[in-house]
Image (cartoon, rainbow, N blue to C red):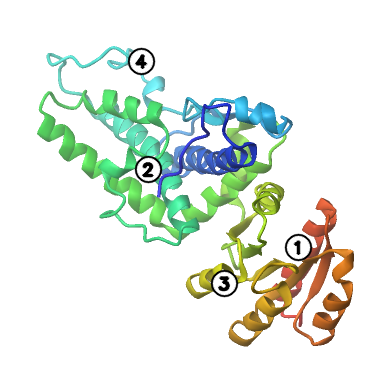
Amino acid sequence: MKRNKISEGSSQDVDADVDVLIEHKQCIAFHAAGHAMAIYLNNKAGNLPPLAFQITLNDLNSKSEEELVAYRTTHDDCIARVEGGRLIELLPDSPVHPGTGHNDAMPPLSNDYMSAFETDIINLLIGSLAEAKHIAEIDDELFNQQLVNLTALKNYGGSSDFALVTQYIQRFSACNQQQDKKLYELFSIAFNFIDKRENWAAITRLANYILNCDKNIISSEEVVLLAKQPRAANEKPAAILFVDDEENVLSALRRLFHNERYITYFALSGAEGLDILQHHAVDLIISDMRMPEMNGAEFLNQVVMQWPETIRILLTGYSDMQSTIDAINKGHIYNYCNKPWDDDALKLLVRNALEQKESGQRV
């Protein structure tokens, strides 16, 4: 389930590295969104004082592909990170400061310190759990405590978060067994937070806000406003399948839609596209017309027989216009888009088609 980071080798293919960076950005957006929403929602649920914090962002959208490849994602929090928002920082004479290590002779923690430690650890764990749940959703995998346990959770970003959790948990006891027991207890609370539909909806809203934000800082006030937004009738984003036999075309489409709120799948042939449809619910398909073995019209004709409610769009060159017109006239194609496409026009075509489908209009 865990995605690989962008490679450090300059000889790697540019498109592949950019695709990896896009996936990495999405994972870190959900990680930061989970942590930030937990600071507000989890603390509020525990009747704890509100905290000031912010999410700081590094702007990568304006960089060229070569600059993105050169960009080294050597830290899990280099794209977006939460600053502040820890209860322990509000308490006077805090017995724990990151990097001080464990002191076996430290006296038992007071109730105030214990509550602050526990809440801060839970909020940090929720960040990693949000990233893990995001990956499980896009991979259509199960998300439960048996599969995503504490050991597995260390693979989901936020190495600095986990380092802080380790420092915190060592303050509870000198006994490793007691530390493990307490950490598992707090992990279960964090998992239950993520598992609540309304919490996950708020995290998803914030993650998408992070991905589309053109600022360097998101304030805690903005996070609170997003948390208070009423949940839409259908929080799950629409799913789009792109089919084209050229890798560079799929990479271009991946980059074009990576900041849009869609679940995306990619196939290099009609046969591969049909296999994806067998395993995933898809709302809209964009298929190239000219492909070997099975062209776009033939592929979409098979789609309409098995998944008639799926919206079907052809990518076509001017030389294929007659076959495109024939496909549209047979009623199997919603619309078409010329190659090379206009980015804004293609995104608008997709948005309009999905809005029509959601409103119940025939497409």
Q: Position of residue 212 (x, y in %)?
A: 68, 42
Which is nearer the N-term, disc 4 or disc 3? 4
Residue at 89% across / 65% down in the picture? 318
Residue that badge 4 annotates:
92
- The numbered disc on residue 271 is 3
Which is nearer the N-term, disc 3 or disc 2? 2
How much space separates mark 2 and mark 4, taking CA atoms?
Answer: 21 Å
Does residue 240 sit above or below 24 in this rendering? below
* Closer to viewer: mark 2 or mark 1: 1
Residue that badge 2 annotates:
46
Which amino acid lies under the numbered mark 3 shown in the image of this protein? Answer: Ala
Q: Residues within 10 Å of mark 2 (few under 14, many from 20)?
A: few
Foreground pick, 30 / 256 = 256
Q: Position of residue 193 (x, y in %)?
A: 38, 50
Secondary structure beneath label 2: loop
Which is nearer the N-term, disc 3 or disc 1? 3
How much space separates mark 3 and mark 1, taking CA atoms?
Answer: 26 Å
